[in-house]
Image (cartoon, rainbow, N blue to C red):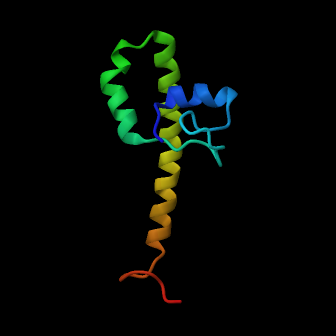
Amino acid sequence: HNFCGGCCHEWLKTNLSCPVCRVKIAGPPVPLLQLDALIQKAVYPGMAAEDRRDWDARAAKWARKRAKLTEALRRKFAARPRGGDPPG
């Protein structure tokens, strides 16, 4: 299921299950960039200042994590021989 990051984090403060089906979660939520972009355009302009600060902090944290993941993938693919996967 997909949720706005703010709503999801609020729910997970007191529940370790999906808000829809109540299945126990196996790990932290994964950001859905398309939903975040929609919220940024449609909801963010009307947010209270405190909510904007929270949103901005989460967005900055995810940007740092995404940069680290991107760099790790670049190194991994740069180490591969040209033409695809290494043999074996």
Tell me which residue sits at (49%, 65%) in the image.
75
Which residue of the protein is positioned furthest toward the front in this rendering? 21
Which residue of the protein is positioned furthest toward the left in this rendering? 41
From what the image shows, is residue 72 above or below residue 81?
A: above
Q: Position of residue 36 (x, y in %)?
A: 40, 34
Residue closest to the eye, 78 or 4 = 4
Q: Is residue 12 left or right of residue 5?
A: right
Q: Position of residue 14 (x, y in %)?
A: 69, 27
Residue closest to the eye, 2 or 88 = 2
Q: Is residue 53 left or right of residue 37?
A: right
Residue closest to the eye, 35 or 57 = 35
Q: Is residue 19 left or right of residue 36?
A: right
Q: Position of residue 52 (x, y in %)?
A: 46, 18
From what the image shows, is residue 69 above or below residue 29?
A: below
From what the image shows, is residue 14 above or below residue 2?
A: above
Tell me which residue sits at (53%, 45%) in the image.
65
The quarter holding residue 17 reads top right
Which residue of the protein is positioned furthest toward the top in this rendering? 48
Q: Position of residue 69 (x, y in %)?
A: 51, 53
The total of numbered circles placed on residues is: 0
Tell me which residue sits at (39%, 81%) in the image.
84
Tell me which residue sits at (51%, 12%) in the image.
50
